[in-house]
């Protein structure tokens, strides 16, 4: 290749502009690492109300793009921001679709017009390339919201010279969310009718956006090695395990990295005191500050403080937590939680805060500032997920010396090593069965070691020494990009 790799990165969310989960962290960090390795990269995402209200600099470029939707052409407004001086991020705006309080759903359920919103966004992302005259070598798209893109490239744009050599990589961050819609909406896609069949986009008489990405992309990856294997099984594949097994040779697992510029207790501007591997005294100050933030009594300074930062959903293991709440709060512990999600959990944790005012600090919100304080101030971090494609909070927790207690699934299993007191190796605690009693006994095990300074010091040192920076993962993505691009050129040549 005689030019820098040109990448179009299409994502439904990216830090620091808009976030619901780990995808946003990936989309905010990976492109900067790719650019540092020599790639030329443009990002595209929707212009949500959250972007508009972010206070981050961006400019209006005009309403130049017309997007066909059924019988109509709808105008898309274009805006431009930057992840850093070298990485532009283009925003696709249309108020009726994206000027809303939430990104995809309210606590009461999904938006009724998500199909229209993300058909519009996917078409607009490709039209943006034409508008900019940008011919990508790689189109890297993420999650069901962008799943239709490779279907357009294999059909509507099949003979477009701009995309002639474009190889498409589709990343699955969470296969449980697939973008399933009534078949009556298929005509809005503008795709050829023959793509609506069981080998294509059809899934039990509905359209499946995630399936479109899996079927039509040149290569597919997930965000950890273990999860790439798990989703080929009925337990974790959510009905798509068959098509994934069929595409097994094109399916890769690349563990997410984290951005240690943003997540590092030695220079984290959100913390009251810095700390690092050689001097942990600041962590105690951070714990005091966190207790203060939640108006919890100073006496909790001397007991293990358990933390959670999560989407409040069944997937994250909150049903296990519900089962053990009384036994957990009977222990000598403190507990803090930050998150938003399903209404039943909003209600549950509001009750927990009232019932245990001396032990539980609850914040039903998204608050990046507080997330950093919890990672630094807690002693033990809980992630009892039913499944976890990668998980980032356990990796942040390691960096902050906050010992993770996790279920051995997906990326949690790939990043957390169960502590062995005989060798003093390991950086956290894992349980295998999705079972409330196992979860509770693993928490109790962590607490026992917390009370043994010799072992706890080893755990802290092992955790803080772990390195999951983006550099390594970005290199692996570049290798995948080059392989896909060369295979694409090979197919064209033959």
Image: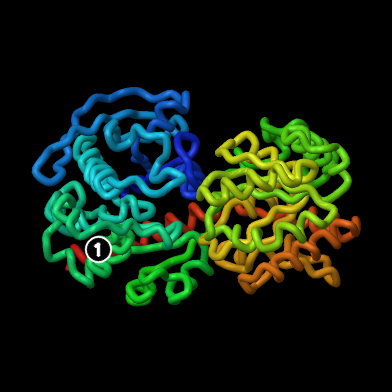
Does residue 483 appear to the left or right of 120 in the view shown?
right
Q: Of residues 171 and 106, which is closer to you in this image? A: 106
Q: Position of residue 426 (x, y in %)?
A: 75, 64
Q: Position of residue 362 (x, y in %)?
A: 67, 42
Is residue 365 at least partly visible in the picture? yes
Q: Residue at position x 37%, y 63% from top?
A: 220
Does residue 5 appear to the left or right of 18 in the view shown?
left
Which of the image's four quarters has the C terminus? Answer: bottom left
Residue 53 against residue 319 in the figure, above or below: above
Does residue 115 appear to the left or right of 176 in the view shown?
left
Q: In the rendered image, which residue does mark 1 sit on?
A: 206
Q: Position of residue 311 (x, y in %)?
A: 54, 49
Residue 336 picture quarter: top right
Q: Residue at position x 73%, y 46% from top?
A: 355
Query: Within 10 angstroms of label 1, few (less than 14), some, or many (20 or more) residues?
Result: some
Q: Residue at position x 17%, y 36% from top?
A: 74
Residue 457 picture quarter: bottom right
Is residue 249 at least partly visible in the picture? no
Q: Position of residue 323 (x, y in %)?
A: 66, 63
Residue 441 against residue 105 in the figure, above or below: below
Secondary structure under the numbered disc 1 in the rendered image: strand
Residue furthest left in the image: 71
Residue 480 picture quarter: bottom left
Q: Of residues 67 and 277, which is closer to you in this image? A: 67
């Amino acid at each position: 290749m005689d030019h820098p790799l040109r990448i179009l990165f299409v994502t439904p969310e990216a830090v620091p502009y808009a976030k619901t989960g780990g995808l946003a962290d990936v989309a905010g960090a990976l492109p900067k690492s790719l650019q540092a390795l020599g790639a030329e990269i443009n990002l595209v995402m929707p212009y949500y109300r959250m972007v508009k209200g972010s206070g981050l600099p961006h400019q209006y470029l005009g309403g130049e793009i017309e997007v066909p939707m059924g019988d109509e052409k709808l105008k898309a407004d274009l805006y431009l921001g930057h992840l850093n001086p070298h990485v532009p991020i283009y925003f696709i705006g249309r108020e009726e679709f994206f000027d809303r309080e939430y990104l995809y759903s309210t606590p009461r359920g999904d938006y009724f017009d998500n199909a229209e919103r993300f058909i519009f966004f996917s078409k607009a992302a490709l039209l943006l390339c034409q508008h900019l005259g940008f011919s990508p070598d790689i189109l890297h798209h993420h999650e069901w919201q962008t799943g239709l893109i490779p279907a357009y490239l294999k059909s509507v744009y099949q003979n477009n010279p701009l995309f002639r050599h474009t190889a498409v990589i589709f990343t699955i961050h969470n296969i449980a969310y697939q973008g399933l819609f009534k078949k009556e909406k298929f005509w809005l896609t503008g795709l050829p009718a023959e793509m609506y069949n069981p080998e294509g986009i059809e899934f039990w008489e509905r359209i499946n956006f995630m399936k479109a990405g899996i079927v039509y992309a040149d290569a597919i990856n997930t965000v950890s090695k273990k999860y790439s294997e798990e989703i080929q099984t009925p337990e974790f594949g959510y009905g798509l395990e068959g098509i994934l097994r069929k595409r097994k040779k094109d399916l890769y697992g690349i563990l997410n990295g984290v951005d240690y510029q943003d997540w590092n207790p030695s220079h984290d501007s959100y913390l009251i005191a810095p700390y690092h591997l050689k001097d942990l005294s600041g962590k105690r100050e951070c714990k005091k500050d966190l207790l203060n933030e939640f108006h919890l009594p100073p006496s909790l300074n001397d007991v293990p403080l358990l933390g959670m930062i999560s989407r409040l959903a069944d997937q994250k293991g909150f049903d296990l937590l519900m089962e053990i709440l009384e036994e957990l709060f009977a222990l000598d512990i403190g507990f803090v939680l930050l998150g938003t999600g399903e209404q039943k959990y909003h209600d549950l944790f509001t009750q927990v805060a009232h019932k245990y005012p001396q032990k539980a600090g609850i914040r039903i919100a998204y608050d990046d500032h507080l997330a950093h304080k919890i990672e630094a101030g807690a002693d033990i971090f809980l992630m009892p997920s039913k499944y976890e494609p990668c998980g980032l909070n356990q990796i942040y927790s390691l960096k902050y010396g906050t010992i993770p207690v996790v279920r051995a699934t997906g990326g949690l299993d790939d990043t957390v090593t169960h502590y062995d007191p005989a060798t003093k190796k390991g950086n956290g605690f894992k349980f295998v069965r999705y079972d409330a009693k196992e979860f509770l006994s693993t928490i109790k095990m962590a607490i026992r070691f917390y009370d043994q300074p010799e072992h706890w010091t080893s755990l802290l040192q092992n955790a803080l020494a772990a390195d999951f920076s983006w550099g390594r993962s970005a290199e692996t993505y570049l290798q995948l990009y080059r392989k896909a691009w060369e295979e694409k050129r090979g197919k064209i040549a033959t």
